[in-house]
Image (cartoon, rainbow, N blue to C red):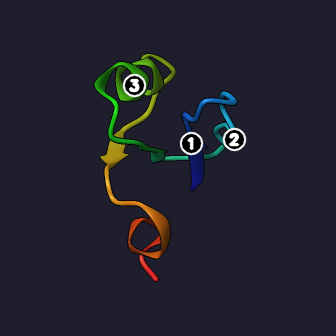
Amino acid sequence: MAAVDATDTGVRGGPAPDAVRLDVMGRHRDRTDLGRCFGATDVIPERGQQGRGE
């Protein structure tokens, strides 16, 4: 699984060729919508360790 983090600096990652899920982290609707346009399957609104599931 790969992750996309739509931040002020842009996209930090992209999908692996065999990725089934593509997560985007963010709370700003316009940014998460952009992530979905690039194929994100899940939006994770939590920040920090909570968002990473730690």
**Residue kind at label 2, given as amino acid type:** Gly
Q: Is residue 7 above or below residue 2?
A: above
In contact (CB < 8 Å): disc 1 and disc 2 = yes
Q: Residue furthest bottom?
A: 54
Query: How much space separates mark 1 and mark 3, taking CA atoms?
Result: 12 Å
Disc 2 secondary structure class: loop
Question: Relative to 49, is 27 on the left or the right?
Answer: left
> Which of the numbered marks, if any, corresponds to residue 5?
1
How crowded pointer 1 is (Cα within 10 Å; few <14, some 14-19, many 20+) is rated as: many
Report the front residue among 21 and 27: 27
| Residue at which label 3 appears | 36
Alpha-carbon span between mark 1 and mark 2: 7 Å
Residue lying at 57% horizontally and 41% vertically, measured from the top left: 4
The residue carrying mark 2 is: 13
Say which quarter of the image contains residue 27.
top left
Q: Mark 1 or mark 3, which has the lower sequence index?
A: 1
Q: Please determine whether, in this image, residue 50 is positioned above or below residue 33.
A: below
Which image quarter: residue 15? Answer: top right
* Mark 3 residue crowding within 10 angstroms, few (<14) / some (14–19) / many (20+): some
**Element at badge 1?**
strand
Residue depicted at 40% across the width and 42% down the height: 26
Residue 54 percent across, percent down from the top left: 46, 83
The numbered mark at residue 27 is: none
